[in-house]
Image (spheres, helix red, strand yellow):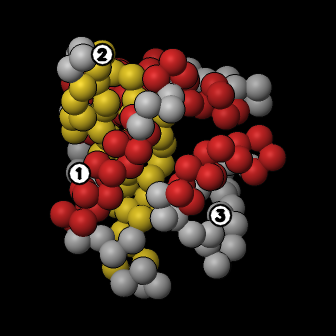
């Protein structure tokens, strides 16, 4: 097998969006409609402009089977710029094969190259996604001492 992690460009926006749409269907598909075409437009835009948004695809024999996205954020408490892992998805048949770890390791390396002092990630609710939370904890992520992240849709 030819395994490779690549930094996605806007030309791979559809591939990134296809994997992210599967993640969203798993997380919130029962609560809202997920439109892969709309996600593809957004992915292409974010990957083509300097939004500080990056996606890495894990390819096996040229086929994308995993994705991780990370964006640059900034805060005084963080000492300036830092990274936020926005999405991480691996196709079900490729899970437990260290692909998620390889993608995370790639983002950690990227964050160090960018000079970010930290990475943050929001995790889904514990009752349904304990395996995801355990994965991040195994990789050294700690619970946020500030509190839960909340959102306001505008």
Q: 95 or 125: nearer the eye?
A: 95
User: Residue 45's image quarter?
Assistant: top left
> Badge 3 is on which residue?
149
Label 3 CA crowd tier, 10 Å (few <14, some 14–19, many 20+): few
The disc, 1 or 3, on the residue closer to the chain's N-terminal end is 1
Q: Nearer the viewer, residue 96 or 115?
A: 96
Residue 24 point in image, percent of width and height: 60, 31
Q: In this view, does 115 lie to the left or right of 96?
A: left
The residue at 39%/22% (across/down) is: 65
Task: From the image, state whether disc 1 or disc 2 is nearer to you.
Answer: 2
For the residues marked 1 and 3, what is the alpha-carbon distance in whole angstroms?
A: 25 Å
Query: Residue 14 in the image: x percent, y percent?
Result: 35, 21
Asked whether the residues under the numbered discs 2 and 3 touch, taking CB atoms below 8 Å apart as contact, a structural biologist would say no
Q: In which quarter of the image is residue 15?
A: top left
In this orientation, does residue 41 appear? no
Q: Which residue lies furthest to the right in this view?
A: 127
Q: Give coordinates of residue 87: x percent, y percent.
A: 48, 42
Which SS class for mark 2? strand
Against 108, residue 130 (above or below) is above
Mark positioned earlier in the residue sequence (2 or 3) = 2
Q: Which of marks 1 and 2 is nearer the N terminus?
A: 1
The residue carrying mark 2 is 63
Q: Which of 66 and 79 is in front in this view?
A: 66
> Residue at the location (56% across, 30% down)?
23
What residue is at 44 percent from the left and 53 percent from the top?
A: 85
Q: In this rendering, would 13 be left or right of 138? A: left
CA gap, disc 2 and disc 3: 34 Å
Secondary structure under the numbered disc 1 in the rendered image: loop
Residue located beneath label 1 in the image: 50
């Amino acid at each position: 097998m030819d395994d490779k992690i690549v930094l996605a460009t806007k030309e791979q926006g559809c591939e990134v969006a296809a994997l992210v749409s599967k993640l969203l269907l798993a997380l919130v598909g029962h609560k809202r409609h997920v439109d892969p075409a709309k996600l593809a437009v957004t992915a292409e835009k974010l990957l083509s402009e300097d939004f500080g948004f990056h996606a890495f695809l894990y390819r096996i024999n040229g086929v994308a089977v995993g994705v991780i996205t990370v964006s640059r954020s900034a805060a005084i408490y963080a000492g300036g710029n830092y990274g936020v892992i926005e999405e991480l998805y691996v196709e079900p048949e490729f899970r437990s094969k260290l692909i998620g770890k390889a993608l995370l390791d790639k983002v950690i390396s990227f964050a160090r190259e960018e000079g970010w002092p930290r990475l943050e990630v929001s995790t889904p609710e514990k009752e349904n996604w304990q395996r995801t939370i355990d994965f991040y904890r195994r990789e050294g992520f700690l619970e946020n001492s500030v509190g839960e992240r909340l959102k306001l849709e505008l």
